[in-house]
Image (tube, rainbow, N blue to C red):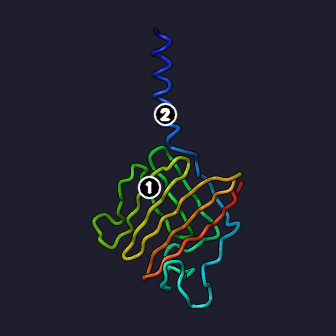
């Protein structure tokens, strides 16, 4: 009976660790990024439009390096000069607090993939992070200025 109780206790304690997924912590360097749909032609991305969703310098731009810090309950992502913090409980965080135009972030796990959501003003985005053979793969969905686009960005871990 003791063995059965101990086994059940060990399984219940290990379950939250498995649910968190892999660690994305570290410094990552851009390896490749799919070109934006209709890049350089002034057209819209998937979903029509155009505008900021297709502008490399706009919201959700691809950066050469990404630094990720990760704990059991929080993820912090540094891209260029921008930093965003996410709690892994699915509840939104607003920076600065109470600002209706502030950066709103929230995150959750779906299996081994980490979903990072962000909204600022009329701009929405979601990055789905996964690890594949040591590379960080980011599927980025952006909606901004009436247009939307999805692209895949791959980063290699810096040692």
Which element type, helix, strand or loop, lies under badge 1?
strand
Judged left or right of residue 136, residue 107 is left
Q: Quadrant of the C terminus?
A: bottom right
Q: Residues within 10 Å of mark 2 (few under 14, many from 20)?
A: few
Residue at point 43%, 82% (across, down): 145
Residue 109, image x, y percentages: 48, 50
**Pointer 1 residue:** 107
Residue at point 50%, 85% (across, down): 50
Q: How many marks?
A: 2
**Image height check: is 11 above or below 137?**
above
Residue 82, image x, y percentages: 50, 68
**Image height check: is 89 above or below 152?**
above
Asked if the residue at tag 2 contacts the one at tag 1, i.e. Cβ–Cβ closer than 8 Å, the answer is no
Q: Residues within 10 Å of mark 1 (few under 14, many from 20)?
A: many
Residue 53, image x, y percentages: 50, 79
Residue at point 62%, 84% (across, down): 39
Residue 143 found in image quarter: bottom left
**Pointer 2 residue:** 15
Q: In the orientation shown, which residue stands out farthest toward the left?
A: 98
Q: In the orientation shown, which residue stands out farthest toward the bottom?
A: 42
Give the label on residue 157, or none: none
Residue 113, image x, y percentages: 54, 52
Q: In the orientation shown, which residue stands out farthest toward the front?
A: 47
**Image height check: is 73 above or below 156?**
above
Separation of residues labelled 1 and 2 (CA atoms):
19 Å
Residue 94 found in image quarter: bottom left
Residue at point 39%, 72% (across, down): 120
Q: In the orientation shown, which residue stands out farthest toward the top?
A: 1
State which tag comes first along the sequence, 1 or 2: 2
Which element type, helix, strand or loop, lies under badge 2?
helix
């Amino acid at each position: 009976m003791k063995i059965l109780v101990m086994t059940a206790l060990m399984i219940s304690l290990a379950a939250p660790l498995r649910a968190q997924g892999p660690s994305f912590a570290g410094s990552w360097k851009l390896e490749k990024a799919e070109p934006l749909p209709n890049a350089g032609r002034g057209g819209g991305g998937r979903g029509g439009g155009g505008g900021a969703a297709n502008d490399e310098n706009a919201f959700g731009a691809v950066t050469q390096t990404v630094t990720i810090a990760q704990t059991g309950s929080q993820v912090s992502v540094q891209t260029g000069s921008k930093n965003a913090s996410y709690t892994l409980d699915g509840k939104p965080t607003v920076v600065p607090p109470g600002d209706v135009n502030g950066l709103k972030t929230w995150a959750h796990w779906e299996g081994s993939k980490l979903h990072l959501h962000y909204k600022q003003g009329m701009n929405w985005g979601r990055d789905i992070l996964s690890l594949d053979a040591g590379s960080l793969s980011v599927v980025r969905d952006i909606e901004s200025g009436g247009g939307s686009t999805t692209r895949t960005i791959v980063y290699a871990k810096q040692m």
